[in-house]
Structures are given as structure tokens and as C-alpha cells.
Amino acid sequence: MTNLKKGYTFNLLSVLMMAVGPLLSKFGLLHISPSKAAIINTIAIISASYLWGIVTKKTVSFHFEKEIILLAVFNSLGVIFLFISMDLLSPVQVGFLGRFYTVFAVILSVLILGERMSKSEIAFIILAILGTFMFVNKGGVGNSTLLGSLFALLYTFFFALTNIFIKKTLSKDKNSNSILFTNNSITLIFVLIYAVLVGDLFNGNYSYKGISLIILSSVITGFIGTILLYEALKYLRFSIANVTRAFSPVILAVISFPFFPIELTVLNIIGGILLIVSILLLSLGDNKKHRETENQPS
């Protein structure tokens, strides 16, 4: 398997994991507050990361570096805003609003990483974003609260910013699991401070059912899905990897439908088709570019 195929395989698996998480989180938030969910989420990821290091015999190490501390700050804000928005909105609404992540990721990859895109890639990205807007045109975000939508946009921005710094931090000599462990260990400090400030940490209202659902969601999304993304970023450009992730709202809509039914209009269906086709064309174009680069004489 070529490095490019490895990248797309890891990215696809990550997308599948990320699509399941919001539904589990919403059920968990029916029994527990957003700040407590954020704490449980972070602890669950730290524990899973540490145990994975033992299982794979690659013990996690703590990377105390300026860029990793910065990405932890951004990740903390992303986690807090995610659970607040999830508490206010349905998982389908959060999933679709979360696709603004793609917009932020592309803009930040150009501004911070200095990545360049061809005209065809820009066109496919615009079509993917347009398809996303069409897919959520009716019911998807129209009934969501303004505050919930604001927090959803904020969490997507900070997660995009977090992954930008992860891309800058990743290297062959740094284990992606160790970066995940360090990131969430520092994140836990900020999340605990937030829980204290809102008065949730010591009120004793902890539901076992809510805790279990948040832990399950965290392991699937925050650990497995994130590790797969980190591995994908070793082989794919940041902008390509994250535009491909626009598949997740469609998958989320399918698995959430029995619990949170949504009405699909003709415009929604056309948008979904446009979204999928543009992403496939974007992936095929990137694959062709890599083959041409590999075939060039050194």
C-alpha cells in the first residue's frame, strides 16, 4: 500500500469514528452537564492513550514544548465549546455546523502552514462547502438556537487551529499517541478550571449512565478517531485530509435519523450528492498529483 493510500485509509476510518461520537455525546448530555462531560472526555482520552502505549509497547512520553502547550489551550476551548453546543443543539445540527471546520482548516492551512492549492482543488473545495450549505438548508440549522450555533462555530475554529499546530508538531521522531497524551493532559487543567468557575465540579450530580456514554463517545471519537487522523496527516496534506472529512455529517445524519428524524428536501439531496462528488474528485486529483510527483526523475 502506498503512503497516499495509507493516508486516505486512516482518514476514512477516522471520519467513521468521528461520525458516531456526537450521537453518543448527546445521549450522555441528557444526564450530565457540559463541563463535567468535558472533564470525563479528557480523562477518558488520557487513560486510553496511556493504556494504548502499554499495549503497543510504545510508552507515552510528555512533550513539554511551546507549540504543544498552545495546541492544548486551543483544544481546551474546542472541547468546552463542543459540549456546550452539543447540549443546546441536536447531534445532526452540531455535525453539520461542524463542517465549517473545513472552511477554517483550509483558510488556516494557507495562512499558517503556507500550503498552496491548485485552481481545481480550490474549485472542488468551494463545491464541497456549497454542497454542505445546501444539505443543511432546511431544518439542519434553521431551528437551532443562535447561542448554540455560535458555540458550534467556535469549537470548529479552535479544533481546526489545534490540528494546524498538530501538523506543525508531528514528525517522524514523535509518536502521535504521545502528542495526544500531552495535549489532553494539559487540556485537563484548563477544563477543570472552567468546571470550577461555573460551579459544576463539586456539586456531586454525576450520573453513571451519562459518564458511561461520554466515556464511550470519547474513546471512539477523541482517542481512536484522533489517532487515526494524526496518522493520516503524516501522509496527506492538511487541507486535503480535512476537506475529505466533510463526509461525516452525511454519515451522522444516517445513524441519527432513527433518534432525531430530519426532513430532506430536493435541495438537501442535491447538496449531499454535490458534497460527495466534489470530495471524490478532490481525492482523485490529489492522487494523480502524487503519482506524477513520484514518477518524476530525481
Image (spheres, grey):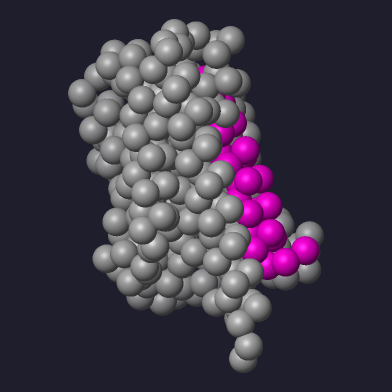
Query: Which quarter of the image is occupied by the C terminus?
Result: bottom right
* Part of the protein shown in magenta: 1-27
- Which secondary structure class fits the magenta region best? helix
Magenta run includes residue 231: no
Q: Nearer the viewer, residue 195 or 23?
A: 23
Is 104 rendered above or below residue 178? above
Q: Residue at x 34, y 29 (%)?
A: 133
Q: Is residue 8 visible?
A: yes
Q: Quadrant of residue 140?
A: top left
Q: Residue at x 37, y 69 (%)?
A: 115
Query: Percent position (x, y) of residue 277?
Result: 52, 37
In this figure, what is the number of numbered marks?
0
Is 29 rendered above or below residue 197? above
Q: Is residue 73 visible?
A: no
Query: Percent position (x, y) of residue 275?
Result: 46, 34
Query: Percent position (x, y) of residue 219?
Result: 62, 42
Query: Which quarter of the image is occupied by the N terminus?
Result: bottom right
Magenta run includes residue 23: yes
In this view, which residue lies farthest toward the left?
A: 146
Q: Residue at x 46, y 32 (%)?
A: 274
Is 140 rendered above or below residue 65? above
Query: Percent position (x, y) of residue 21?
Result: 55, 33
Q: Residue at x 56, y 44 (%)?
A: 280
In this view, which residue lies farthest toward the bottom?
A: 298
